[in-house]
Image (cartoon, rainbow, N blue to C red):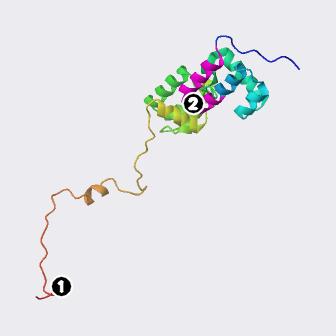
């Protein structure tokens, strides 16, 4: 078995305990206290037991601590998959939405997200899901709007004839003696 990786020489057990006391991150505190145990002369097995982890995890903590100091022991956000759309794709997408579809060219009279996905595939060879494209359009400031539905057989002026345009004249109903009890 090889020798353990040495810890940085610019820190000691007291400094790590002080940093742990001031930290708000519980996981960082646990890691710092385990490394302070090693600085204090304890074994890596004792540090692993105190931290509730295995020896390999303590080794990973030592590597992170040696590379970045106490800040390296804070959990970082996972980077995730990089975006499939770059600035060029977003600019083209915004231009397509602003200009609207050309029925003879695009075969549609209004954009749907699936149509925009297909245009991105045809134009750039970029495969984007509907959910991703919806999120990208929302980030660009566009909202999903649709027209109010209308019955296919509705006459053009039918709604106007039923609208109440004048002021309502409220009339007081007559009090009938049948509904009011005589006192």
Name the foreground residue: 123 vs 48. Answer: 48
Magenta includes 59?
Answer: no
Name the foreground residue: 108 vs 124. Answer: 124
Residue 145, how many percent across, how many down?
43, 42
Q: CA distance from mark 1 to mark 2?
A: 73 Å
Q: Which residues are magenta?
A: 11-30
The secondary structure that most of the magenta stretch takes on is helix
Name the foreground residue: 123 vs 19. Answer: 19
Density class for disc 1 (Cα within 10 Å; few <14, some 14-19, many ≥20) is few
Q: Is residue 163 left or right of residue 19?
A: left
Residue 38, how many percent across, how many down?
72, 22
Residue at disc 2, secondary structure: loop
- Image vertical order of residue 123 relative to residue 112, above or below: above
Numbered mark located on residue 179 in the image: 1
Name of the residue lying farthest toward the right: 1
Residue 74, how many percent across, how many down?
61, 26
Q: Quadrant of the N terminus?
A: top right
Density class for disc 2 (Cα within 10 Å; few <14, some 14-19, many ≥20) is few
Of the two numbered discs 1 and 2 in the rendering, the one whose residue sits closer to the viewer: 2
Residue under pointer 2:
25
């Amino acid at each position: 078995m090889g020798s353990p990786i040495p810890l940085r020489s610019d820190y000691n057990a007291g400094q790590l305990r002080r940093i742990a006391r001031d930290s708000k991150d519980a996981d960082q505190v646990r890691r710092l206290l385990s490394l302070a145990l090693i600085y204090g002369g304890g074994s890596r097995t004792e540090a692993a037991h105190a931290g509730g982890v295995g020896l390999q995890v303590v080794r990973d903590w030592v590597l992170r601590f040696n590379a970045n100091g106490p800040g390296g022991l804070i959990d970082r956000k996972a980077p995730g998959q990089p975006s499939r759309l770059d600035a060029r794709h977003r600019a083209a997408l915004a231009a397509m939405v602003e200009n609207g579809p050309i029925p003879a060219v695009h075969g549609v009279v209004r954009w749907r997200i699936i149509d925009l996905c297909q245009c991105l595939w045809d134009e750039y060879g970029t495969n984007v899901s509907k959910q991703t494209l919806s999120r990208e359009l929302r980030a660009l400031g566009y909202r999903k709007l649709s027209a109010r539905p209308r019955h296919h057989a509705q006459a053009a002026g039918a709604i106007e004839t039923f609208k109440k345009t004048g002021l309502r004249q409220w009339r007081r109903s007559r009090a009938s003696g049948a509904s009011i009890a005589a006192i």
